[in-house]
Amino acid sequence: GQQVMQIPQYQHVQEGEDFTTYCNSSTTLSNIQWYKQRPGGHPVFLIQLVKSGEVKKQKRLTFQFGEAKKNSSLHITATQTTDVGTYFCAGRNTDKLIFGTGTRLQVFP
Amino acid sequence: SAVISQKPSRDICQRGTSLTIQCQVDSQVTMMFWYRQQPGQSLTLIATANQGSEATYESGFVIDKFPISRPNLTFSTLTVSNMSPEDSSIYLCSVPGGPSEQFFGPGTRLTVL
């Protein structure tokens, strides 16, 4: 079945440093979504990418969808303590959303 | 956006018993999804619950263990049957929110002793 892997599994950064998580799918995706889950919370939708090579920005967050539509990345510039949480990519397979393994981000002040 | 509530928010259960988790949505939706999130892990889709038809289960999940009801377009239940400690997880229901995003309920944190 379809597998979606993310690296790194964990990332600890000093506040102000940048952070990147990478997402790789075993199959071509029609689109990729990104979610953030705060500690003790539930996943919250961040963004969806649809087009090959697409790049979208949300303030300090930059999302990319690979040319082959099998990989994606999320980059956070100048992390803040409010960025703490686990970031999941998710690929859509017909009506189902298949979540990546997640990257847990810890930001030290 | 959809507002989703789940009951109970958490429970501690004895092995061998069953727990039914309720999911209520503030709008009518065709599809509802049930996910499991084991401690420190990602979300795994258990099944898709469609109103008026039997739920569709993912590989590794069976109806006898996780029976699902979907009596109307705003409500669903997931039962975790004959529980063992390995069933300790967060169970989340989810609904589509238009063409892209998916909304999640707050989750039910289950501990099986």
Image (tube, coloured by chain):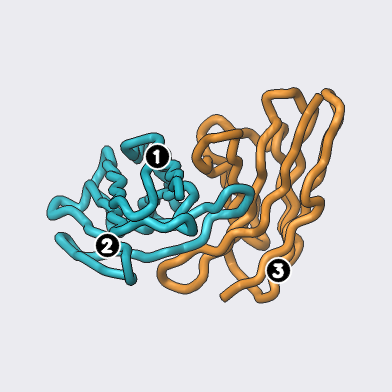
Camera-side mark, 3 or 2 = 2
The percent coordinates of residue A80 (x first, y second) are: 42, 58
Q: Classify 10 Å Cα crowding around label 3: few (below 14), some (14-19), many (20 and above).
A: some
Near-viewer residue (A16 or B66):
A16
Seen in the image, is B68 located left or right of residue B41?
Answer: right
Amino acid at the residue labelled 1:
His
* Residue B66 screen position, x and y as percent: 70, 38
Residue at numbered disc 3: B74
The residue identified by callout 1 is A12
Alpha carbon distance from label 1 to label 2: 19 Å
* Residue in the image at 49% along x and 49% along y: A85
Callout 1 touching callout 2 (CB < 8 Å)? no
Q: Out of A74 and B54, give the one closest to the viewer.
A: A74
Does residue B107 appear in the picture of this structure? yes
Tell me, for residue B71, which label it has, or none.
Answer: none
Is residue A51 depicted above or below B64 in this figure?
Answer: below
Crowdedness near tag 2: few (<14), some (14–19) or many (≥20) residues, C-alpha within 10 Å? some
What subunit carries mark 2? Answer: A
Q: Colour of chain B?
A: orange
For chain A, give the colour.
Answer: cyan
Name the residue type under label 3.
Thr
The residue at which mark 2 appears reads as A62
Q: Chain of mark 3?
A: B
